[in-house]
Amino acid sequence: MRILAKIALGVALLLTCGVGALLFLSEGVTGERQERGSPAPRPIPGPAVEARTERHGQILFGDLHVHTTYSGDAFIFSLPLLQGEGAHPPADACDFARFCAELDFFSINDHAENIAPWQWSETRQAIRECNAVSGDPGNPDLVAFLGWEWTQSAPAAMPGETAPRAHYGHKNVILLDTEEGRVPSRPIGAGAGGLFEVPIPSAGWAALRAGIALSDPAHLGAYLDFNRYTRDVRAAPPCPEGVGVRDLPDDCLESAETPAALFAKLDEWGTRSLVIPHGTSWGIHAPYGSTLDPQLRPAMHDPARQRLMEVYSGHGSSEQYRELLDFVLDDSGQKQCAPPRDGYLPCCWQAGELIRERCGEVSEDVCEERVERTRQLFVEANGPMGASVVPGATPDEWLECGQFAESFLPALDFRPGMSAQYALATRDPDSGDEAGAFRFGLIASSDNHKARAGAGYKEIARKAFGDAYGLRDDWAERMLGERPARSPEPIPASEAGFFLPDPGQERMASYYYTAGLVAVHASTRDRTAIFDALDGRHAYGTSGPRILLWFDLDNGPGGSVPMGSEVFVSGGAPAPRFTVRAVGDFEQLPGCPAHSRERLSPERLRTLCLDECYHPSDVRQRIERIEIVRIRPQVTGDEAIAERIEDPWRVFECPDARAGCEVSFEDESFDGSGEILYYARAIQEPTPAVGGDPMGCRRDAQGRCLEAKLCAASGPDFDPDDDCLAPVGERAWSSPIWLRPALDPGV
């Protein structure tokens, strides 16, 4: 994480007393362990749960990506130096899901790489306590699933492989069981202690932690608690290799360096689990040029567990594929800056334009040489330090460079080869049909780091209901350094000094949104029915609203089948006929319903729910249109991905009615000769959303960004009362329906 790198580099600026005293404060003062907390003792009353069923039928809504401050990054975000609001332990996730968001199910997914052994024990117990409050297990008000996040990013270099090929990304593991003895004794991470593997000696970590604490004595307790946590994680030894998972000690940090190793360890445990890739297109983690292809290599994909993909979260959409080129190769095979194309502005190109604006009175030839040199220096930096080649540039000056501007609430620094559409279109024939293809259902969740499961029911509080964070004003200069003077000449990234001006890093807060949701068509409300619906891909995602969505193949060989189904058809089959039905969410009333006010104290409602809960009126939002995406997956693995995706393939405008929208259509061109899949998007009428226009652009007639104003989370432009609202068409994405030739191998 880059903020940790900045903190590490700034240690010398923070230390104000002797090393001996620092070590004493860091290692000798205990700090407090963060307890799991206790959930409120009463469930949602039966009539309120029945009212949900009346509103939604047997569609249940949840969040399968929730972090408490047992996650190292969430703990950092909670500290005063990042304007944090303090600890949010596992019991907060339970109460928020039940009383604030009124979800039907959720999971806790703290980062396995930095969960101390005692925290995993506390998490297991917290999940069981949350379920114990839920009433009848056959008809609970809320189902809490146990899980964790496997968090991997490509290293800068890896022997024998380029960084993109070593990148597997982040995956959430969701377990059906919660009983002791039936669940893993340790979460399985991608590397022991990953968050704290910044290459600093132990004494350096001690000095760093103490230096931060001493720089903010008014909040000393919070920093000492963080110190205790980091010591606990770093003190846990890596688990020994070559030992069966049931024979490992409970107090070690277990790791699986690749997806294949993760799947093998889950096989050893034998418990039923799902592994859900997420945040795949987020460029802060995925290197330039990353694609999902390496995960179709032998054993790197488990089709029995990887049934779903998170297409949207509070960190943005990872749905669409476009050819967004940052670099091209010249005739000699050297990497060069790609020019703007199809509305996409590479940051290396914008770097040249920023230097062009500073040319002043120099000749055109001299100016052009500076521009080209700037672009090449950016390319050679090959990463976040690229922006440092333009000294003194502000984040706004970079406009929308590196961003998938035409996408719905895009992920920061979008990596198209990691998108859901790329996943659905790509194939590796050499790996066998099932393991050589991603057949993902599409879901969404929050990735909230404040234990606020499903915090997308109202578009408010971008820093509490989302993950926008920024350094406190009195820390910014110490941590980031002074912005370099503006120079007409570029400089190599290696000479940039301490200040890190990466435009993605500084404007990251603009690309944080509120929570998405996962919805399931479940037979009942109990945990097994929900898990079965997820496993069967009878699930879909929304960008936050509780949009009701059905997508069915009407004339399959055995009759009608729902979203997530694979249907094997022969060449003589009739044209497939589909029906999509969508109903908009209810407009929200202010405040919280009576049953939440009765079960949570006024202080708890204020600090956890911010006095705003899911509180539906009886007026629905209108569904504006339904879009159908058709994808013909690769056959040989060599076909151009863009040519396999038709987005949108069909568009249906909906009548101006709030009762919902239903459309039926056929694919008359279907001939049964190859695999083909379809999925639906249902889009609501535009409403204000947090971060709806991430860069706040003033545009020309062609839609190009001429001037930007980011949504700051700190600094002189930060307005704590501004949620950066802009209108968007909130949406739901169905899981696909696959039509496969009846003679496919393995059928």
Image (cartoon, helix red, strand yellow):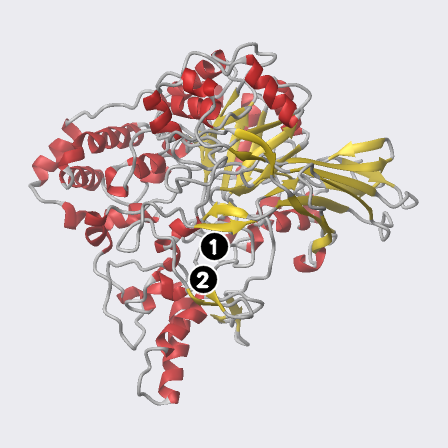
Is residue 161 among what the camera can see?
no
**Residue 283 drawn at (x, y percent):** 46, 52
**588 above or below 279?**
above
Q: What element carries label 1?
A: loop
Residue tagged by mark 1? 693
Mark 1 is surrounded, within 10 Å at the Cα level, by few (under 14), some (14 to 19) or many (20 or more) other residues, namely: many
**Residue 466 drawn at (x, y percent):** 42, 40
Q: Residue at x 21, y 33 (%)?
A: 223
Contact check, label 2 and label 1, Cβ < 8 Å: yes
Q: Which of the labelled discs sits on residue 15, or is there none?
A: none
User: Which one is nearer the viewer's eye here, 492 or 684?
Assistant: 684
Q: Residue at x 31, y 60 (%)?
A: 501
- Identify the amino acid type marked 2: Cys
**Residue 517 drawn at (x, y percent):** 55, 35
The quadrant of the image that shows the C terminus is: top right
Task: Choose top left, top right, bottom left or bottom right for residue 124.
Answer: top left
Image position of 166 (left or right of 500): right
Q: Residue at x 43, y 58 (%)?
A: 696
Point out the residue furthest to the top here.
136
Residue tagged by mark 2? 697
User: Which one is nearer the viewer's eye here, 100 or 259?
Assistant: 100
Image position of 297 (left or right of 575): left
Question: Cα distance, mark 2 to mark 1?
Answer: 7 Å
Mark 2 is surrounded, within 10 Å at the Cα level, by few (under 14), some (14 to 19) or many (20 or more) other residues, namely: some
Is residue 153 among what the camera can see?
yes
Image position of 404 (left or right of 600): right
Q: What element carries label 2?
A: loop
Task: Choose top left, top right, bottom left or bottom right for residue 104.
Answer: top right
Image position of 698 (left or right of 542): left
- Identify the amino acid type marked 1: Asp
User: Which one is nearer the viewer's eye here, 153 or 352?
Assistant: 352
